Amino acid sequence: MPQTIVIAFSTLDGIIEDPDGHGGTSHGGWAFRDGPVAPDHFRLGPWLDTGVLLLGRKTWDLFSHIWPRRTDDFSMAMNRMPKLVASRTRPDLSAWQNSSLISGELLDTVEKTKADRDVIIAGSASIVHALAEHGKVDEYRILFFPTALGSGTPLFSPKAAPVQLRLLCAEASGPAILARYERFAG
């Protein structure tokens, strides 16, 4: 059954803001201070061929300057993957192949897409928060880095109802830990 999967870089205190430093915050770049991470650090493997990537416009802008220029196997799979972009504006999406603008409501689009494909949300805190607030996230794949910031945009919205998660697995990935959690109903 297709799922909605959130992938995120996070500090130990749950902050996901500006992991690569492109956001210009004073604490930005925390995810790469110990060097690069493996290309498929979220262990997406087959989902790259069967899923749909859902991004906000800012994340799409950042990714569209990175992935189309790369030619390794992981990057080529990212480039082939269909991409849905949530934006209040009408950006030009021609810079990254297989990108299209969501034309309807976010929740409706996710439900329709999830009818036959996994939906993978990367970055895009506002999308993650909106989906979580409506109980629409099935799995979280969080790469926790050995950093605590004390402030910034959190992975989990303070507006969302409490959620019970079950650990599926945890593994070291360079200086970080990849933890996979699924929503647990009971």
Image: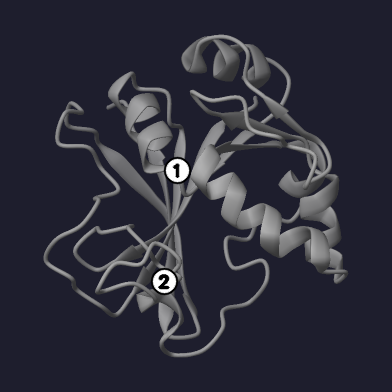
At which x and y percent is residue 42?
A: 57, 60
Mark 2 element type: loop
| Residue located at (81% from left, 66% from top) | 69
Q: Which residue is mark 1?
A: 124
Q: Which quadrant of the view contains residue 50?
A: top right
Amino acid type at mark 1? Ser
User: In whole angstroms, how far apart are the C-alphas of marks 2 and 1?
Assistant: 15 Å
> Contact, CB < 8 Å: mark 2 with mark 1?
no
Q: Which residue is mark 2?
A: 21
Q: Which quadrant of the view contains residue 184?
A: top left
Left or right, residue 17 beside residue 21: left
| Residue located at (78% from left, 47% from top) | 95
Q: Which quadrant of the view contains residue 162?
A: top left
Residue furthest to the left: 150
Mark 1 element type: loop
Q: Earlier in the sequence, mark 2 or mark 1?
A: 2
Between circles 2 and 1, the one closer to the viewer is 2
Q: Answer above or below: position of 139 versus 45.
A: above
Residue furthest to the bottom: 34
At which x and y percent is residue 134?
A: 33, 18
| Residue located at (50% from left, 85% from top) | 174
- Of residues 30 and 147, which is closer to you in this image? 30
Q: Answer above or below: position of 185 versus 156.
A: above
Amino acid type at mark 2? Gly
Q: Answer above or below: position of 19 versus 83.
A: below
